[in-house]
């Protein structure tokens, strides 16, 4: 099956929307449940919070990228504003060391 460039971009955009939905599910999950038997350590809680922060950053980055690509497909290419370089949490933290 042969696809042209625009079709492939549309397929990528659709897949990206699905990934944003999955990231929203991560954000919506509770860190601490109502069940008091599930005691969570501070380290596990910190990791869960960091995972949610990463999911939030990733979701907004993906949405921004989708908007840029859709504008390009529709011929509404805007002047590029200084695009913020995506960095993972580890990359951000390692800069100062």
Image: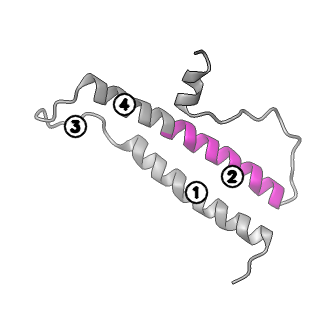
Callout 1 crowding tier (Cα within 10 Å): few <14, some 14–19, many ≥20: some
| View extreme (top): residue | 96
The residue where tag 4 is placed is 47
Residue 28 vertical placement versus 17 (above, below) = above
Q: Residue furthest left?
A: 37
Q: Give the alpha-carbon distance from disc 3 to disc 1, as whole Å.
A: 28 Å
Determine whether the residue tagged by mark 2 lies in a helix, strand or loop: helix
Image quarter for residue 10? bottom right
- Residue at image mark 1: 17
Residue 33 disc label: 3
Residue 60 within the segment the image draws in magenta: yes
Q: Which residue is mark 2?
A: 66
Nearest-to-viewer mark from 4 and 1:
4
Where is residue 67 drawn, in percent x and y? 72, 50
Reading the chain from its start, which is encountered first: label 4 or label 1?
1
Task: Classify mark 4: residues with Cα within 10 Å, few (<14), some (14-19) or many (20+).
Answer: few
Disc assigned to residue 5: none
Q: Residue at x 72, y 32 (%)?
A: 84
Evaluate if marks 3 and 1 touch, with contact meaning CB atoms under 8 Å apart.
no
Residue 20: x and y, percent?
53, 51
Segment colored magenta: 55-73
Q: CA distance from mark 3 to mark 4?
A: 16 Å
Q: Earlier in the sequence, mark 4 or mark 2?
A: 4
Distance between mark 2 and mark 3 Cα atoms = 34 Å
């Amino acid at each position: 099956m042969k696809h042209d460039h625009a079709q492939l971009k549309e397929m990528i955009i659709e897949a990206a929307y699905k990934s944003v939905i999955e990231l929203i599910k991560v954000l919506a999950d509770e860190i601490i449940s109502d069940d008091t038997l599930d005691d969570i350590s501070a380290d596990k809680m910190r990791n869960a919070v960091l995972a949610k922060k990463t999911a939030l950053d990733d979701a907004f980055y993906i949405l921004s990228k989708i908007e840029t690509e859709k504008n390009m497909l529709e011929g509404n290419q805007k002047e590029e504003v200084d695009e913020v370089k995506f960095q993972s949490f580890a990359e951000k933290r390692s800069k100062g060391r």
